[in-house]
Each structure stands twice: as C-alpha cells, then as structure tokens.
Amino acid sequence: MLRVLDMPYNELRKDYLLNRWVVIATERSRRPTDFAKPKAEITQTAACPMCVGNEHLTPPAVMLYLKENDGINVAQDPLTGERPKNWLIRVIPNLYPAYSPPKQPEDSEQIFKTEFLADAIGGHEVIVESPNHDEDPADAELPQLELVIHAYIDRLKALSAKPYVKYVSIFRNFGKEAGTSLSHAHSQVIATPIVPTTVQEELDASKSYYREYRKCVFCDIVKQEAKGPRLIYENAEFVVFAPYASINPMEFWIVPKKHSATMIDLTGAEVEALAETLKLSFKALKDLVNDPPYNYGFHLALNQEAKDYYHWHLEVYPKLSIWAGFELNTGTYINTVTPETAAESLRNAVKL
Amino acid sequence: MLRVLDMPYNELRKDYLLNRWVVIATERSRRPTDFAKPKAEITQTAACPMCVGNEHLTPPAVMLYLKENDGINVAQDPLTGERPKNWLIRVIPNLYPAYSPPKQPEDSEQIFKTEFLADAIGGHEVIVESPNHDEDPADAELPQLELVIHAYIDRLKALSAKPYVKYVSIFRNFGKEAGTSLSHAHSQVIATPIVPTTVQEELDASKSYYREYRKCVFCDIVKQEAKGPRLIYENAEFVVFAPYASINPMEFWIVPKKHSATMIDLTGAEVEALAETLKLSFKALKDLVNDPPYNYGFHLALNQEAKDYYHWHLEVYPKLSIWAGFELNTGTYINTVTPETAAESLRNAVKL
C-alpha cells in the first residue's frame, strides 16, 4: 500500500452552533511558531491623538475615569471645552461613526425604510484603554486592565439602555494587518439598531438547544472543553480554549463558567479574574507568535428572553492567515493549524 | 439648525438574498482613487513552478490544453513521466490539498462521522492560466482568456460528475494581500462533499422567491440593476454591476442575462462574451485603482432541482479594506465606498 493511502483525510468540522464548516488541514498542518514574523509597524506621522496632552485633537469624551485625590471618578469632558489630563480611561465618539445617534428623537422610531434599507442609527465610540501608548492586554498592569473591563461594562450599560439599540458590539483590533490605523491601546464599541447576523444565528441555535435539552449549550461546551485537548487555561471563573471548529489559526475563546447572557452584572471578583485571564492569554499569544495582530469581540445577548439560553463570551482571532476566494465565496474555511496544536502551544506558553 | 443635523444617516443595506447587512458609510465616503497604493510585490525566491520549463516542479497535470499542429488538444501528462511544454493551459493537483479524492471508493460513501465531523473528501486543483507568467485577465489576449473559461467549464464538468462531489468552487486570488503566494496567473478549483453555507443560503432564498413569484430572483436583479445607477457595463450576454449591498469597496458582479444554474452549457459565443466582459472589467479596475489585489469566485448550483430558481454568476471582491473585530464578530459589514460611486468610476474607466 502506498504511504499516501495511509494518511488520514483532512477533517471537515462544524461549529458548535453556526452552520459553518472548516477544513482542519492536518496534512499541511503548520506549527504555531511558523507564523512568527516581523511586525508591520504603524507609521505614526503626527502626534498620537490618544496620548495624554493631545485631548484637544479628539471630540469631547463621553466618559472618563479620572484619577483624583479621593480615588477614581467617572465623568465626562466639561462643557467649558476643558479637557482634563488626569484620566485613566477615556471614551470618545468615533470621528467617522459607522452608526450615529438619532438627530431627532423621532428619527429612531422608523429606522426601516424598506425590507432592504434602514438608517444606521446607533453609536460608535472609542475606548482609550490607558494613558500609556502601548499598554496592551499582554503587558498591561492588572488594575488598569480591570478599568478597561469596567469601561466595557459601563458603555454596554449606557448604550444598551437607549431605546433604539438592539445590540452592542465591543471589540478590539490590534496591529496593522488586523485593521487598526492607530497604535495607541484602544477598543471600540458599536451600538446597532438590529441584532447582527452572527449573533442572531447563535441565539437561534442556543435557543433550539435549550428547548430540546433544557440547558445552556455554552455551559455544556465549557464542561466538555475544560476536560479535553483544547483547553488552554482555567481559573475559578473562566475557561480559555481553542474551539473545536476554529476558523482562524491560534483562535481562542474566553468563556465564563457562570451562566449569564451579558457582562452587565459581573462582580468585582469576576472583573479581576477576567483581567487576569486576558493578560495571561494575550501574553502567551504574544510570546508564542511574536506579538501577532488580532481581533477580539464580545458576544452577548441583550433581550431578556435570552437569559436562560445565551451565554456571553469573548472570541479572539489572531490574524495569521488571509481568507481568499474560496472562503469569501463559500462561507466555509480552511485552517492550517489544528485547534489541538494551537491549544497545546498556548497552554505551554501560559506563564502563571 | 446645526449643519450636522442636516447630514443624512449612513445607510444600512441588506443583501438581495442573504441575511447580511452592510453600513454604506456615506459620511466617511472615500473616492475609489483613494485606494490606489504601491503594489505589494510577491518576492519570488525560486524558479516559478508554473512557468514553462518548470513542469517537473509540480505533480503531473490532470488536464492540459496542448498546442499541436492540428489545433488545441485536451490531454493530461503522460504516465511516462514526460511533461509536455507546449501547453496553453495546465491543470495540476494542489500540492497541499484542502479536500482530497477518496483513497478507497468506499471512503466516499460515509463522509459524515458525526453531526460535527466529516472527511474532507473532494478535490483541489490549480489552473495555470497561461504559459506567460503575468497574463492576468486585465491584460490577457482574448483567445487565451476563452481557454481559461473553457478550462473552468471542463474541470467543473469533470469534478461535478464524481458521486462524492456536491459543489465545485472556482475562484481566483490576485495579489499578496488577497492571499496568493505565487504570482503566476492562476485560478483554483475546490470540490466539496457539502453545499457550502453561503451558496446554500442563496439557494434557499432564491427558491423561496421562486415559490412566491414564479420567477428567478437573479433575472429580476439583472433587469433592475441594468437600468440603474449601479450599472458598470453590459453587452448582449452579460451585465456587470456594483451590487446594492456590496460589502467590499469597488465590489462588482458579472451576471449572465440568460437564465442558467451553472456554466456547464455555455455556448462558444457566450464564452467569447464572458472573456470580453472579464477583460474589460478587470482592465477598468486595474486602471482605476493601480492594479489592486482581489478575489473572485463563481456561484453556481449543481442540483437539478435548482435549475429554475438559481442563476450562476461571478462575484469580484477587490481587497481594499480589512474586516476587523466588528465585521468578524457580527457578520455585518462597513463599506466606505458607496456602490453607486464604485459603479460610476468603473463605468467611466471601461475602455471599449
């Protein structure tokens, strides 16, 4: 028998919830360290508009965590035009918003013009994560990272309370190849008047699982992955693992053990645990693959009905490959690193 | 009234068929020429394995169009190990196939192991489009481009006849940022044992439209777009337009006027018209945006049942922006060039 006949087929795996298939290319499998390459630097031609002292280069902040004598206070830039410099977190409107707040209250009532057209009413903000230009999660001080998470939660609360907001997407782009043009540590928040496609598919699938089994599919996934070869890290509150049908090389998800549809009610201890989990995971990724570009995003549900069956989590997509004609036209994927290899390497790179 | 109050909202548009929404960012709208930038060259460190004379660097061809005294003949590399050099088109197996043919006939009968796991049985081929290294569609000779289309059709016929093949994706990646590592003019063909997600969604939506209206939704789209502001080019056989809810800057689709679910039965005249349409469209794109990277892919249906309601076409995605945390986590998009602007610029750049 020829040797080629003994080689296994590549695996075609389906996502836990989405009707999304990925070829896990075991035959052309690459090692995580194969992806390490020189960093594409962002050329900063002008002053960084997110650094301390340059606050006048941006619109007034909608939220600030100010360091004051009596501790940390939540504020916004005063109407006087003054821009305090003693901030720890600064949240500003995006200068080129994809989604904007209604200009008149009545504008938010009829956003749909036709079945195919709506007004892009919502919000689009930038969270400056630190006064320090490069205080990214891999190297951030834990107290600062906790403030970032508190800011996520505060903006999620503020925006989801608007009557015209159906979803709030909180995400982070890191590195030029991952689509960011400014290198100062920052995240973005986009509030939309519709529940986005991917989240709606997750809601539908997890609801259907709940109806059949009377339990949360994510709770089951966490139990399963925590005892298997795709586990990366676990503490009392969170599990980090490479998902079974990862569509990105080195993809990992951070999922809370406690069932909850959103992060709105996180306790102080949970925020601390999440900060620690973020830092350990991103430091492992940075050390393993030479500080690669990545995108991350929170998945959550805001509708009260989903509280039993949906379970918030964070999905992290290192940007180590390019989706091309096949992926873009079929909605199916090819991943050249098996999730099991990704998990093993990241697990070994985690420094406690 | 402040000026900002008079500005229109960005438009949130839904795709013709898919449940896919895109913000057409009119406020931050960019001109097509803003995207022109120096080309990222592919550094060719070794001999090009697709150039004439280097045939031994690749596996034996599964199909060749040979230029012989009596015209063009269809062949494959002889079993002697000889590799003819007088080819015009050369189709070779991908060295690192994502999907592979069954090693034993019985392997193709039970590809599904569980609901979440299948063997990636199928095929993965590379179509070398010309003996000339850079005979890309924008600059190809029309007779050569016709051969490329004939090769697409021949491989589509051969692969779709296999009992284990449910879909055949034919696609082209051009330029480093679009995911190609070899710069010789080539396309790829992947045969899959499942109907891919995006195509299945199109099938479901077009079937439902057909049930309601007793006509093909794509025929209606063609009629509508051919008389509107998103038309780019039209000849007797094809219409080229920027789709209403384009998710890529400068995206365009090439759709045949004649209703048909696949390209298998194209006439000689239709192949000629498609070659002309391809060349004009890609030359316009190249001239307008400095030879940008792009991906294109054919969408088609192989099941007999779809012949009334599905309509093959080609979708072209210039690679001029990066999908980041928001797009990747929500499945909704932001496009900074309106399709109307894209169409107008491309229309003006078409040289007849």
Image (cartoon, coloured by chain):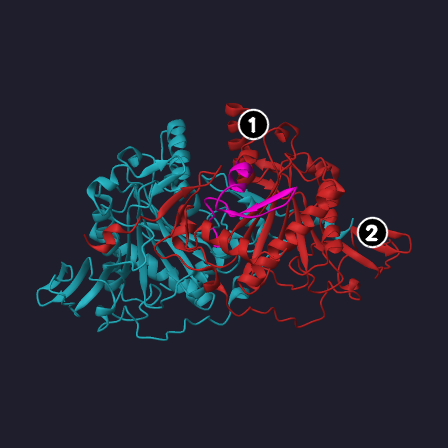
Chain colours: A cyan, B red
Relative image position of residue A61 (x, y in whole percent): 20, 61
Q: Nearer the viewer, residue A233 or B33?
A: B33
Relative image position of residue A58 (x, y in whole percent): 25, 65
Q: Which numbered tag is attached to residue B215?
A: 1
Point out the frontmost of discs 2 and 1. Answer: 1
Badge 1 marks a residue whose secondary structure is loop
Relative image position of residue A77 (x, y in whole percent): 15, 62
Residue marked by disc 2 = B76
Q: From where the camera sits, is residue B292 visible?
A: no
Q: From where the camera sits, is residue B267 visible?
A: yes
User: Residue farthest to the right?
Assistant: B69
In this picture, which residue range is highlighted in magenta? Answer: B221-249
Q: Nearer the viewer, residue A110 or B191?
A: A110
Q: Earlier in the sequence, mark 2 or mark 1?
A: 2
Q: Callout 2, which amino acid?
A: Gln
User: Residue farthest to the left?
Assistant: A70
For label 2, the crowd category at 10 Å Cα-Cα, with few meaning under 14, some 14 to 19 and many 20 or more, is some
**Residue A67 to residue B96: above or below:** below
Q: Quick check: is B234 in the magenta stretch?
A: yes
Please check whether the numbered discs 2 and 1 fall on a single chain: yes
In this picture, residue B46 sits left or right of residue B70: left
**Residue B25 to residue A64: above or below:** above
Q: CA distance from mark 2 to mark 1?
A: 42 Å
Q: Callout 1, which amino acid?
A: Lys
In this picture, residue B242 sits left or right of residue A124: right
